Amino acid sequence: LTGRETRLTKGGKEELMNGVPDWVYPEELNQREAFWWSYDSKKIAYLQFDERPVLRYPLVHQLTPDGKLELERYPKAGAPNPVVKIFVIDINTKKIIKIDTGNNPDVYIFKVRWLKDRSEISFQRLNRRQNVLEFLIANPETGRSKVIVTEKEDCFVNTYGELHFVQINKSKFLWTSERTGWRHIYLYDFNGNLLNRVTQGEWPVGRIVGVDRENEWVYFTGYKNRGLESHIFRVKLNGENLTKLSKEPGTHFPDVAPFCRFYIDSYSSFDVPRTVTLYQADGTKLREIGKATKEKYDSLHLIKPELISFKAADGKTDLNGIIYKPADFNPEKAYPLICSVYGGPLFPRVRNSFYGTSFEHALAQLGFIVFVMDNRGTPNRGKKFETATYLKLGQVDLADQVAGVKFVTQRPYIDGKRVGIYGGSYGGYMTCMALLAAPDVYHVGVARAPVTDWKNYDSIYTERYMQRPQDNPDGYKKGSALTYAENLKGKLLIMHGTVDNNVHPANTIQLINELIKLNKRFDMIMMPEQRHGFRGQYGKYSREIMVEYFIKHLKP
């Protein structure tokens, strides 16, 4: 080692990046790295991102007299994507080999890794429509590749946060799939032969957290009880001896030691704050490492959140919800209702875990009933539940939210004529849709950084759930807040960062343009120099303004 820097690639520029990811791959495919060393440290595999076809969206920094223009390469729904290729470079000879990723450049290439003891690389290829996922291996000396496993879905193949592939040894690997409607683990050889199912049943695997290769155990998380609880399991590679290791009901987050002799379980439930415990591999408890205390929490005399279930808008599907009440709750009073919403794919809100002094708890202490729920389209309850919103964002999910409000407002202490709603990002979108598409149900809304028209959002996320605008024009129209602008009757406050590079300010500008043309009254705050999340004083200010807005317009 000389400590000298050596340039390995050439031709890189702002719009042609070697070993550096673009914006959309980290955001939507969790592909945050773009180069990987081989196990022998003699080669590097890397991705090349050609962003020349991609739209440049302008973000203007305006806190100085001269301003500053930031042009972000951002592929919108239906618009050109970056062209991504894989190369392998030999550190000593500087020879570069291009890996064969197929003839169609309009695909997603991601999850590259070197295969141990095989001198090959693996990668995954997803078609633009995102309903065909292929697992390939390639020879880094010749660039030739071959497909090992193919997953096909009528709707979309889930990829976000999923390993899918875990190598066991030189000849075998684990693969996760939702081909049965539930995410499960399968054992394959590198010729693409399915050796056996490792897990099965009408419940979904969460993630593989460890593999004991010597004793052939697979450790993983799985979801039970309508997705409310996540537990720790282990099973033999041949699919035998499935064992639930976690005993307590609630939410368990395991951290398995490298050779799977021990694991740490970080666990909580509605009644039990975070507890961290060390276990042997077979689930034998060794010692409690740490436990959050409840003394200060108990001193607040808060009412424990109430877990409820009710029917979705289809009248058949059971949904989960949480109700927060003020500490001085009086069942003889009629309280205004505030809905805290996200409602989009990937992120559930309702779990059997300890919520402590959440913002929802704090809001309830001001004299509100606060309601949180998970509509259809959210994860961890199987593919049928998750794909109920496919091609229909803003329709099925909003209908379920409305069903939730109608269910809880049957309680005599909740005033169905004073209903508020708030959320950010997808929750901001749901807030706008609620005020505009269901104006007789929702009366006051605070939307932070909302998508208002899916044509404005990025290609990977939007097309996964809606396909391209040209393929699903009716779905895009019905899923756009702009379509319902004329219905606004309640009070709507929109907050947006001026340099939000995720949900662009154009979303808010387009919506208020429609509202102005229709002579509708609304409130708006632009947060200077803020991205998708409001930081520091801006976050504090936004929360205070939101609380004041609800007090002003919902309290009697």
Image (cartoon, helix red, strand yellow):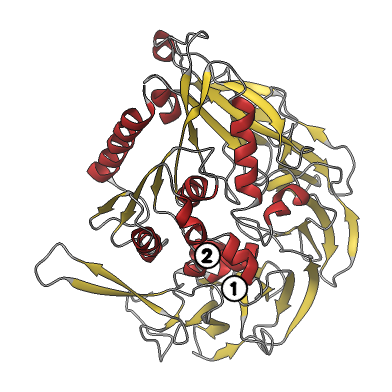
Residue 545 position by quadrant: top left
Specify whether 273 is left or right of 150.
left
Rendered residue at 77%/37% (across/down):
315
Quarter of the image that includes the C terminus: top left
Dot 2 falls on a residue whose secondary structure is: helix
Specify whether 295 is left or right of 283.
left
Q: Is 241 located above or below residue 268 in the figure?
A: below
Residue nearer the viewer, 418 or 546 = 418
Identify which amino acid the numbered label 1 is placed on: Pro
Q: CA distance from mark 1 to mark 2?
A: 8 Å
Q: x%, y% of residue 6? A: 37, 83
Identify which amino acid the numbered label 2 is placed on: Trp
Dot 1 falls on a residue whose secondary structure is: loop
Q: Earlier in the sequence, mark 1 or mark 2?
A: 2
Q: x%, y% of residue 297? A: 42, 15
Q: x%, y% of residue 312? A: 71, 38
